[in-house]
Image (cartoon, helix red, strand yellow):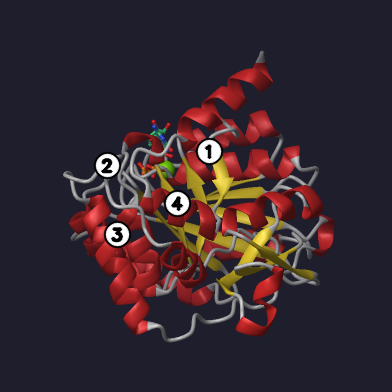
């Protein structure tokens, strides 16, 4: 992975330069105040990684976040303040240094294809109706538009008609589809995948108290040890419910958080707080029902700015761009 350091007056300024030079998917690795002896180069030192391309899309193992407990308490306080209903456009602007620390604190990782010489498997779990299936479809459509080989879908679902929506989308996108009513069926589908394949496994929504499904998911995850476990959660949930949901799903050891339905709320502080609290990288953000437009890779800058600036006009800008593209 190629890293590039920018010294600038702000993280935004560095982001603009990095997007121009490294492309729109440049990933922010960290941002911090420039050391005194290099301050003449710019107030903020920001390091970006060039996004991986094509088949060799293998990211280095994520670096665990350093222990920044005092910073965490400080920024969590700010997020709580800005997330409160009383906060709005008149809310206190955070110090640039706080924003930079928040950006550094949150982890993101939108890679899906990992490791050469084997198939990559991603299992999507989450509460009922949070947007797992549609997110899988958006991700597949995104891969295809990025000229990646189409992923294969596996629907782990033994309900009557289970997996049917995904089957229809698979046909439309010309993706392989396997309905897997049992754990063994999922494992067989995963084993049948070739090196370089991407297998996206959909699961039924797990309601609180459904111990039968919970046990089945636990076994599935323990038998697919190399799989990424994406926990999908709706941004529209109340902060306390979101927090309880992340906690409830910890037994499945999620490796990624995927936040959905960002279009249904204007309060994003809890997304940042939960990702930082559990130190789990955020993979993608979804914000509508359009496929594949309404999904984007999560970035530390986006999550921080959404947390700090309630009522951000990011979604409106995205919509205008999408409408312009389809006009
Ligand atoms: N507004 C909005 N709707 C979404 C988003 N993501 C999904 N939806 C809608 O939410 C509904 C449920 O989405 P699904 O993908 O079926 O949810 P699921 O988690 O697979 O549901 P179960 O399998 O029943 O647990 C559908 O109507 C989706 O179109 C989003 O980001 N924004
Ligand atoms: Mg579903």
Q: Which residue is drawn at 64% across and 43% down?
A: 140
Residue at 51% x, 43% y is 135
Residue 36: percent from left, percent from top: 61, 82
- The kind of secondary structure element at disc 1 is helix
Read off the residue under disc 4.
Answer: 305
Question: In the image, which disc is placed on residue 74?
Answer: none
For the residue carrying disc 1, how many other residues have a C-alpha within 10 Å: few (<14), some (14-19), or many (20+)? Answer: many
| Image quadrant where residue 228 sits | bottom right
Q: Disc 1 versus disc 2: distance between alpha carbons?
A: 44 Å
Give the secondary structure at mark 4.
helix
Q: Which of marks 1 and 2 is nearer the N terminus?
A: 2
CB contact under 8 Å: marks 1 and 2:
no
Q: Is residue 245 left or right of residue 114?
A: left
Q: What numbered label is drawn on residue 90?
A: 2
Question: Which residue sits at x=82%, y=64%?
Answer: 56
Q: Residue at x 73, y 52 (%)?
A: 17
Q: Mark 3 points at which residue?
A: 79
Q: In this view, does 214 lie to the left or right of 170?
A: left
Residue sitting nearer the eye, 135 or 297: 297
Q: Which of marks 1 and 4 is nearer the N terminus?
A: 1
> Which residue has dot 1 on it?
166
Find out if the beta carbon at label 1 lies less than 8 Å from the nearest ligand 2 atom: yes
Disc 3 and disc 2 in contact, CB within 8 angstroms: no
**Quadrant location of the C terminus?**
top right
Q: Nearer the viewer, mark 1 or mark 2?
A: 2
Residue 102 image point, x, y percent: 44, 66
How many numbered marks appear?
A: 4
Label 4 vs 2, first from the N-terminus = 2
Give the vertical position of 109 relative to 321 (above or below). Answer: below
């Amino acid at each position: 992975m190629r890293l590039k350091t920018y010294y600038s007056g702000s993280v935004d300024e560095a982001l603009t330069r990095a997007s121009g030079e490294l492309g729109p998917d440049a990933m922010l690795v960290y941002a911090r105040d420039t050391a005194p002896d290099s301050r003449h180069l710019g107030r903020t030192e920001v390091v970006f990684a060039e996004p991986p391309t094509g088949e060799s899309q293998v990211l280095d193992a994520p670096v665990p976040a350093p222990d920044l407990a005092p910073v965490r308490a400080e920024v969590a306080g700010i997020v709580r303040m800005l997330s409160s209903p009383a906060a709005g456009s008149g809310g206190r602007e955070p110090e640039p240094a706080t924003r930079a620390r928040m950006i550094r604190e949150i982890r993101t990782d939108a890679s899906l294809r990992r490791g050469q010489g084997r198939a990559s498997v991603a299992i999507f779990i989450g509460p009922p109706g949070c947007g797992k299936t549609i997110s899988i479809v958006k991700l597949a459509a995104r891969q295809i538009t990025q000229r990646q080989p189409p992923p294969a879908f596996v629907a782990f679902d033994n309900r009557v008609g289970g997996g049917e929506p995904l089957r229809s989308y698979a046909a439309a996108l010309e993706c392989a589809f396997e309905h897997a009513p049992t754990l063994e069926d999922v494992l067989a589908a995963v084993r049948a995948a070739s090196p370089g394949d991407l297998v996206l496994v959909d699961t039924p929504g797990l309601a609180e108290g459904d111990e039968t499904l919970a046990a089945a998911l636990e076994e599935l995850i323990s038998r697919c040890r190399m799989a990424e476990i994406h926990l999908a959660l709706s941004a529209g949930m109340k902060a306390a419910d979101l927090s309880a949901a992340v906690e409830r799903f910890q037994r499945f050891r999620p490796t990624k958080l995927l936040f959905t339905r960002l279009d249904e709320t204007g309060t994003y502080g809890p997304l940042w707080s939960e990702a930082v609290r559990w130190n789990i990288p955020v993979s993608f953000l979804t914000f509508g029902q359009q496929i594949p437009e309404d999904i984007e890779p999560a970035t530390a800058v986006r999550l921080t700015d959404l947390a700090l600036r309630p009522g951000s006009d990011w979604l409106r800008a995205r919509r205008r761009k999408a409408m312009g593209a389809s006009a």
